[in-house]
Image (spheres, rainbow, N blue to C red):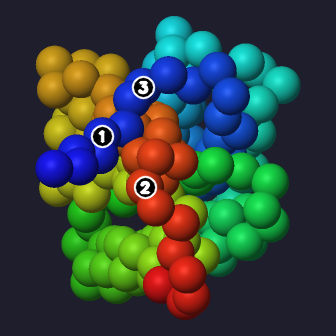
Amino acid sequence: MNTYEGSLEGGDLSIALVASRFNEALVERLLEGAVQALDRNGVGNENISVTWVPGAFELPIAAKRLAASGEVDAVICIGAIVRGETPHFDFVAGAAATGITEAALSTGVPITFGVLTTDDADQALDRAGGKMGNKGEEAALAALEMANLFGALPKPTGEI
């Protein structure tokens, strides 16, 4: 029986982060958590890139471009979408999630979802280094594990 698992070892990996400027104070905290997790697991600064986009809606297209470049082993999307008084939240959150999923599926490169979707700012702060941890860190660890898993899995013979 073959068992495939990814590890958190990042020494040989190149990781791209795509960060949303909207809700930048929250995103900076998520980004810091992600970079610290990459550093703790052996990814050197020379193998980490950060690309800033205007908002969460733009995360998928930048992530797809980076993933399709062939220069990165994984992409981490970082953002914060806080519910307001209009349905704008639903459209942006849904488009970001769907777009990030499509980018990963179409490129075959792991792209992780470090995007907060919360009802209010307090919930967001709790998840950006507060009592609920740091979701940027979690997305970075998932990216490392998936990049290493993809390195261990049999290579596809055609389109995936």
Q: What residue is shown with label 1?
A: 5
| Residue at horizontal 37 percent and vertical 81 percent from the top | 98
- Foreground of the two, 79 or 146: 146
Residue 79 place in picture, x, y as percent: 47, 51
Residue 8 numbered tag: 3
Q: What residue is shown with label 2?
A: 153
Q: Is residue 7 above or below residue 73?
A: above
- Foreground of the two, 46 or 120: 46
Residue 117 place in picture, x, y as percent: 27, 57
| Residue at horizontal 64 percent and vertical 72 percent from the top | 64
Badge 1 element:
loop
Q: Are marks 2 and 3 in contact (CB under 8 Å)?
A: no
Residue type highlighted by circle 1: Glu
- Foreground of the two, 4 or 2: 2
Distance from the alpha carbon under mark 1 to that under mark 3: 10 Å
Precedes in sequence: disc 2 or disc 3: 3
Residue type highlighted by circle 2: Leu
Q: Are marks 2 and 1 in contact (CB under 8 Å)?
A: no
Number of other residues with Cα within 10 Å of mark 1, as a class: few under 14, some 14 to 19, many 20 or more: few
Number of other residues with Cα within 10 Å of mark 2, as a class: few under 14, some 14 to 19, many 20 or more: few
